[in-house]
Image (cartoon, coloured by chain):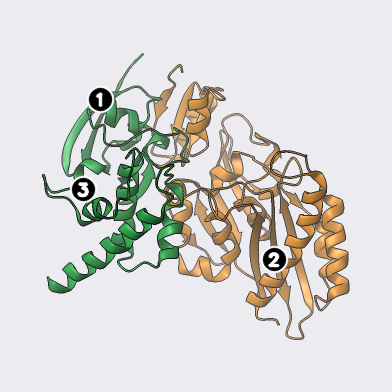
Amino acid sequence: MSRIHVTTTVNGDEREYLCSPGQTLLDALRDELGMTGSKEGCGSGDCGACTVVLDGEMVCSCLVLAAEAEGRRVDTIEGVSEGSELHPIQQKFLENAALQCGFCTPGFIVASKALLEKNPNPTETEVRYWLAGNLCRCTGYDKIVRAVMDAAAELRQERTAA
Amino acid sequence: MPSPAYHAPDTVKEATDLLAANKGAKPLAGGTDLIVQMQSGRMAPAAIVDLKRIAGLKEIREEADHFAIGAAVPCTSLKNNAALVAEWPGVVEAANLIGSVQVRNRATMAGNLCNASPAADSVPALVAAGASVVVAGPSGEREVPVEQIPTGPGKTSLGDGEFVSEIRIPRKAKGGSDAYLRSIPRTEMDIAVVGAGAQVVVDDSGTCTAARIAIGAAAPTVLLVEDAGKALVGSKLDDAAFAKMMEAVSAACNPIDDKRGTVAYRKATAGVLAKRVVEIARQRAGGN
């Protein structure tokens, strides 16, 4: 079976991998590039644990073929922090105890970042609807929503100060 | 899972050639149904023909007499077209009830239609709007009303080598508007137990001059209930007309009993939802 050579930009860096035609982007990230931050929960687009940003829009990487990423831009959880300095959303997840087992957390953080980049001042309802495609079986969501609201407030302050 | 071949053609012609050359080939738009079916083993295409690199298929064009929505336009993009939102708010809302934001950033209305689920949310709205599709195939293009594409759960009228390349929604009639609602036990991330789409046109006196009612998840395919529309035309959308319309809707339904709802529940709910969407569409059209 012939493998497909793909060149794509991942978190700003040009990366290459070989994939089989039916392989998903999630599997290519994890198995070909060793980027295991994106998780497979359901493999059917229901849980959002594999959320990445593809050409500026968040998608389930389990529902994207690896071959489709040719020439595209992929942003993953690995690109959210600046080295060891956490992104404010990550910091607020810690402060609000917005995770327990942590399996869903990369997806929630990538999705929350995508929200706050589009809407810096969301209502709680907007946060809940935006995150409807991310499932968490531990926290009951309240702490996650609070963390996102806190992070939004902090990011707005940073923007005003800058 | 045996791995299919992957093609990303640049033109519609290349895509139809690839599809015609291999009966086991499947077109890929957003992939939110196809990839799930491949992963679960329900479908094992011999080849995948990705439509997203074909020029024009990711665009919405505003023509004099219709909107042309490319087969690869994701549902989220519909919300960014102000003219489309203004003329067909029901279609845009229906497409943006599907799945999550992640899913809607990929899923397309053409895919929703060709997946041929009776519960597809965007389909009743498109049928009510009087939309058609452009079917591209080895012998050229043909235009087909949306309601003639699905023939049963998972089955379409598309022939070998054919795929839906574009959805065409007519420009809104003066005094007209549309709406779509679905019944689900949750607020998001669910599949319609019943769905209803309506387009109504009212004149200055408040008399209904045209109406199209479409029902989802209540039969093997989405239903265009012509008798329901007829029950409204000529009326002031009063209680007597609504009663006739709801009766026509319930009579047309041929649903199944399943974990989402019973036959009786679906028949009754279809009528109620139809009334609600007509009321919303009338309000949007500027009536009372």
Q: Nearer the viewer, mark 3 or mark 1?
A: 3
Quadrant position of residue B66: bottom right
From the image, tell me which residue sits under label 3.
A80
Residue B98 visible in this rendered orientation of the protein: yes
Name the residue: 32% across, 54% down: A112
Extreme residue toward the top, this view: A1
From the image, tell me which residue sits under label 1.
A32
Q: Are marks 1 and 2 on the same chain?
A: no
Label 1 sits on a secondary structure element that is helix
Q: Mark 3 or mark 1: which comes first in sequence?
A: 1
Residue B213 drawn above or below residue B119? below
**Which lettered chain is shown in green?**
A
| Kind of residue indicated by mark 2 | Val
Q: Which mark is residue B277?
A: 2
Residue B16 visible in this rendered orientation of the protein: no
Label 2 sits on a secondary structure element that is helix
